[in-house]
Image (tube, rainbow, N blue to C red):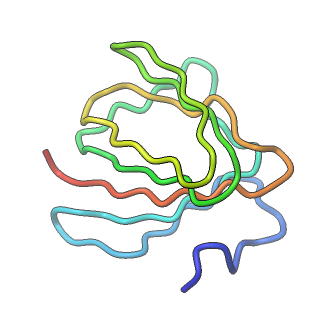
Amino acid sequence: MNLRQDIPAMLPEELIQALAGNAWVRIERIVSRGHHSPEGFWYDQAEHEFVLLVQGAAELELAAPDERLRLEPGDCLTIAAHRRHRVNWTHPEQDTIWLAVFFAQ
């Protein structure tokens, strides 16, 4: 598999594909094309999340402490379990491809 291939031409919603996993870890490919979190919505997950931006551009907002991060290809970070976060922006004219690894506390 190539993370940059087999992306539909029409992408009305984010594409989320499970690539591998077990009871303790889940690896996903996420493709965004101008998608972002709804106004006022925050992710608050029971798992830690390591995210690598493979292609495109995005802006994340994190709470407690408050941060805004502009991500470009190659940028990565780990979001601790229950740290609220949201996607403010992804590039509207190109695919933003994320590799996300979710793992237990």
The residue lying toward the viewer, choosing from 65 and 40, is 65
Name the outermost residue toward the front.
74
Residue drawn 43% across the image and 13% down it: 66
Q: Position of residue 95 (x, y in %)?
A: 74, 58
Q: Position of residue 44 (x, y in %)?
A: 34, 31
Q: Is residue 61 left or right of residue 25?
A: right
Residue drawn 37% across the image and 65% down it: 27
Q: Position of residue 82 (x, y in %)?
A: 27, 30
The residue lying toward the viewer, choosing from 4 and 81, is 4
Give the answer, above or below, for where 77 lies relative to 14: above
Image-quadrant location for residue 46: top left
Q: Quadrant of the C terminus?
A: top left
Give the answer, above or below, for where 1 lies relative to 46: below
Image-quadrant location for residue 102: bottom left
Name the outermost residue toward the bottom.
1
Q: Position of residue 1 (x, y in %)?
A: 54, 86
Residue drawn 24% across the image and 36% down it: 81
Give the answer, above or below, for where 97 lies relative to 45: below
Q: Is residue 2 left or right of residue 45?
A: right
Residue drawn 67% across the image and 52% down it: 32
